[in-house]
Image (tube, rainbow, N blue to C red):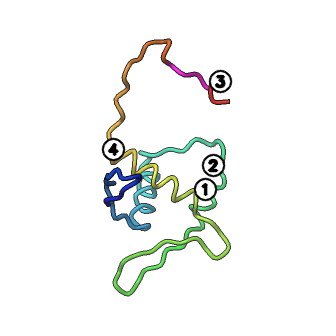
Amino acid sequence: MPFAIGGLKSAVRRWTLSKSELVEAISAELGNRSLRIARRGDWEILQVEFSTMERTVRASGSASYAAPSGKHDDLVMALSLAVFGCRRFERPRLRSCPVEARVSAAGWT
């Protein structure tokens, strides 16, 4: 997708991902234990969101997923996008830098 900011032209790769592809991918990975989630942070909320997702099969045979009315699926979708990114892209190569060039977390406070 081409765009321009301040006269500089660039482009961003675009993927067409359906919600059902993303949800089914993490469901499969959780099922075969290639994806494991630590019981920390919002783990319980994620479990509730994932277990309450509603699957609807259309007349065409394709499936769609959605949170029930009044519920959320934000954490499920965030997890599925993170898994997609990890599976799709290579691990970044770390460049070594001199010790004096490193920035500590204290510099951001």
Per the image, label 2 sits on a secondary structure element best described as: helix
Amino acid type, mark 4: Phe
Q: Quadrant of residue 18?
A: bottom left
User: In what quadrant of the picture does the C terminus appear?
Assistant: top right
The residue pinned by badge 1 equals 47
Of circles 2 and 4, the one toward us is 4
- Going 37% across and 64% down the picture, which residue do you hit? 17
How would you rate the neighbour count of disc 2 (Cα within 10 Å): few for under 14, some for 14-19, many for 20 or more?
few
- Residue in view at x 36 percent, y 53 percent: 7
Q: Amino acid at mark 2?
A: Trp
SS class of the residue under badge 1? helix
Mark 1 in CB contact with mark 4 (< 8 angstroms): no
Near-viewer residue (31 or 103): 103
Q: Earlier in the sequence, mark 2 or mark 4?
A: 2
Q: Amino acid at mark 1?
A: Gln
User: How far is disc 4 from disc 3 in space, using C-alphas?
Assistant: 30 Å
Pick the residue in front: 70 or 11. 11
Query: Residue 43: which disc?
Result: 2
Circles 2 and 1 in contact, beta carbons < 8 Å: yes
What amino acid is labelled 3 in the image?
Ala
Q: Which residue is mark 3?
A: 106
Q: Which residues are magenta?
A: 102-106
Name the mark nearer the viewer: 3 or 1.
3
CA gap between label 3 and label 1 equals 34 Å
